[in-house]
Structures are given as C-alpha cells and as structure tokens.
Image (tube, helix red, strand yellow):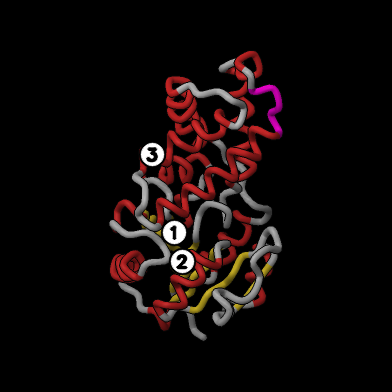
Amino acid sequence: MAYRHIFFDLDHTLWDFEANARLTLQQLHDELNLADRGVDDFERFHRQYLEHNERLWERYRKGFIKQEELRVKRMWLSLLDFKIADDSLAKSLSVRFLELLPTRNLLFPGTHEILTYLRNKNYTLHIITNGFEDVQHRKMQGANLNPYFTHLITSEKANALKPHRAIFEHALSCSQSNAAESIMIGDSVEVDIKGAYDMGLDQVHMNHLDRNRYPIQGEIYPTHTLFHLEELRSIL
C-alpha cells in the first residue's frame, strides 16, 4: 500500500501518559502535603487515579459526562478512595495537574528517531487525539513534537471523539487526504483501531503494553500489531 499520510494518536502512543502522570502526581503529592491529609500511600493513589481516569474517559467519549466533570471527578474519586471528601482539594489538584502535566516530555523509546525517519521518507504526519485542545498543544510543544506534524486534530476542534467517524472525516478533510492513502497508528483498539477501521483506513495497533491484542469486538483485526515504534520501519 502506497501511504502518503500517517495519523498518530498522541497519549499512550508517542507521549507516555502513565509515566508523565506519575511524575506530576508525585510532585503534587509532595507540593500539597497529601500524605499529611490522609493520602498515605502514593503508589495506591497513582494506581487509583489511572483507573478512575480511564473509566471516566470512557464515559466522556460516550457523552455521559462533560470535560470539566472528567477533570475534577478523577481527582475527587482518587481522594475518596482514601476517605477524603474534599471538593476544594480535588479542584486544586485538577487545576495544578493540568498546569504541570503538559510540561512533562517523556516519550516512548524511539519516538523522535522514528518520526525523523518517516519525515525523511516524505510521509505527511498528523495527530488525531481525544485530548483537550489546550493541554495537547502544550504537550506537543514541551516534547518538541511540533516540527514533525502538519496537523494536530483534537476532538474539541473536530467536535467529535474517536472512534466516531466525524473526527476521522475532519482529519481527512484538514489534511486533504483520503482513506486509501492513509494509515492510523494508535494504542487503543476500541478507540484508534476501530475508528480507523470503520472509516476505511489501515491501522497499526501500537501495543506498548501487550494488552488487548486481538481481536476488536470479536471480529476486527488490526492491519498490523507492533510492540515498539522502531518496528514501523518494517512496514513504512
């Protein structure tokens, strides 16, 4: 297949959300003296945050909650796990977390190298992300990813979330490309791979954590499944 346009997911595919969130939560745990407030086990606090965040993002994608509720409730629920029902603290955590998180720049191994390789092969690169507009732009800048990409398509800008067709239609329109000459690379089988599959794009499941490998909803298999970004050289 002669691809011309490559669409990447950002979080969990290039930008290491778990690692960056951990550093940010650790700073907040110290900065806000959370141990003295009852959050006496940082590892548990981090684990609970990731679980609540993932579950709330699923609800957000399905339209059950709004952006602000997601931002605050993931902190409120994480505190509640330690029997702390403090709305003010949850809001403070949310605000400070979104100030600090985008300044982190931990990427998956080989990110800059593979993006340089793809750019040198004259592929046109784009980002399609469900992340918040302001936060994703700051992440891209902080991790020095902007020079590689022509478009950053966010769900806010497209007014649609992956896996819905509208965000992919918006991305193809912005990039003046079509499904036949495009490929989607992402970590989530339910969001990135299924959305691209339904739109007619080939897909690469970037399976950094070796989870949810096959199939999607019992019938959809990704075009490719890879376990390291450098493996993209074998198909592109």
Q: Which numbered disc flags the more N-terminal residue, 2 or 3?
A: 2
Taking the spot 45% from the left edge, 64% from the top edge, the residue there is 125
Q: Is residue 42 magenta?
A: yes
Check disc 1 and give the amino acid type.
Answer: Ile
Q: Could you say whether the residue bearing mark 3 is in a helix, strand or loop?
A: helix
Are there few (<14), some (14-19), or many (20+) residues within 10 Å of tag 3? few
Q: Could you say whether the residue bearing mark 2 is in a helix, strand or loop?
A: strand
| Residue 37 visible in the snapshot | yes
Determine the CA span between mark 1 and mark 3. 25 Å
Q: How many marks?
A: 3
Kindly report which numbered mark, 2 or 3, lies closer to the viewer in this rendering: 3
**Residue ID for mark 3:** 69
Are there few (<14), some (14-19), or many (20+) residues within 10 Å of tag 2? many
Q: Position of residue 107 (x, y in %)?
A: 61, 48
Determine the CA span between mark 2 and mark 1. 5 Å
Determine the CA span between mark 2 and mark 3. 29 Å
Report the magenta residues as a range: 39-43
Q: From the viewer's perspective, is residue 106 above or below residue 229?
A: above
Kindly report which numbered mark, 1 or 3, lies closer to the viewer in this rendering: 3
**Residue ID for mark 2:** 7
